[in-house]
Amino acid sequence: MEYLRKETLIAIVKGDITVEKTSAIVNAANNRLAGGGGVDGAIHRASGPQLMAECRRIGGCQTGRAVITKGYNLPAAYVIHTVGPVYSGQADDAVLLAGCYRSSLQLAYENNLPTLAFPSISTGVYGYPLELAAPIALETIAAFADEHPHAFTLVKMVLFDERSFKIYAEAGDSIFKQE
Ligand code: AR6
């Protein structure tokens, strides 16, 4: 699934983000940047121990914000670590989740990284319902592409499982096809 938004191609694909060849990939991290399961574990395993060493030096990251490290053994040159909200059902969840996407895009833009891949932030261990998270992710990416049309050539959502892929693809259809 691909949508052109100004000069940014927004792609929704099924796959494993650790093999993405974009300039940077985004990690769904925790506040201590301490590593963990899910996509965080997969990225650390594929990148190697230097990634954890750099995360330790940085020390942490606030929920809804992002930090950048090198990619080490990954095909992607950089990893942008963002910390999604643990889903609570409060209005603040959406603000923080949008903040993850916006902060990650801003950090990639400031570092002149023209292609970026995201996993579905917060929808695993952190329990954010996919039906609510998918439109927030896609609308935040689209808004950034509108505001900064020359920042990115490609922003990808890389969904690991069929159900996530389907829900993002449906959200993409209803957000982009109505325009
Ligand atoms: N590529 C792309 N997506 C993946 C991959 C992969 N290789 N592996 C898993 N996913 P989660 P969260 C999907 O739990 O909810 C960690 O322990 C997965 O199927 O990784 O933000 C951190 O340290 C799901 O759809 O992240 C934090 O403590 C999505 O990635 C906590 O989990 C996100 O699931 C963060 O929880």
Image (cartoon, rainbow, N blue to C red):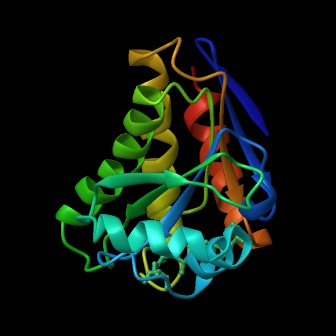
> Of 100 and 75, which appears nearest the observer?
75
Residue 178 left/right relative to 9 = left
Residue 179 left/right relative to 98 = right
Numbered circles on residues, count: 0
Q: Quadrant of the N terminus?
A: top right
Res. 60 image quadrant: bottom left
Q: Residue at x 62, y 55 (%)?
A: 71
Res. 10 image quadrant: top right
Task: Using the rendered image of the protein, determine whether residue 122 is visible from the camera's viewpoint.
Answer: no
- Residue 38 horizontal/vertical position (percent): 60, 82
- Residue 146 horizontal/vertical position (percent): 45, 17
When the figure is inspected, residue 121 is found, relative to residue 45, above or below; the finding is: above
Q: Quadrant of the C terminus?
A: top right
- Residue 149 horizontal/vertical position (percent): 50, 13
- Residue 43 horizontal/vertical position (percent): 65, 70
When the figure is inspected, residue 26 is found, relative to residue 48, above or below; the finding is: above
Q: Residue at x 18, y 63 (%)?
A: 92
Residue 106 left/right relative to 76 = left
Q: Residue at x 56, y 62 (%)?
A: 120
When the figure is inspected, residue 108 is found, relative to residue 65, above or below; the finding is: above
Q: Residue at x 48, y 86 (%)?
A: 125
Instruction: Assign ligand 1 to one image quadrant.
Output: bottom right
Task: Using the rendered image of the protein, determine whether residue 15 is visible from the camera's viewpoint.
Answer: yes
> Of 139 and 152, which appears nearest the observer?
152
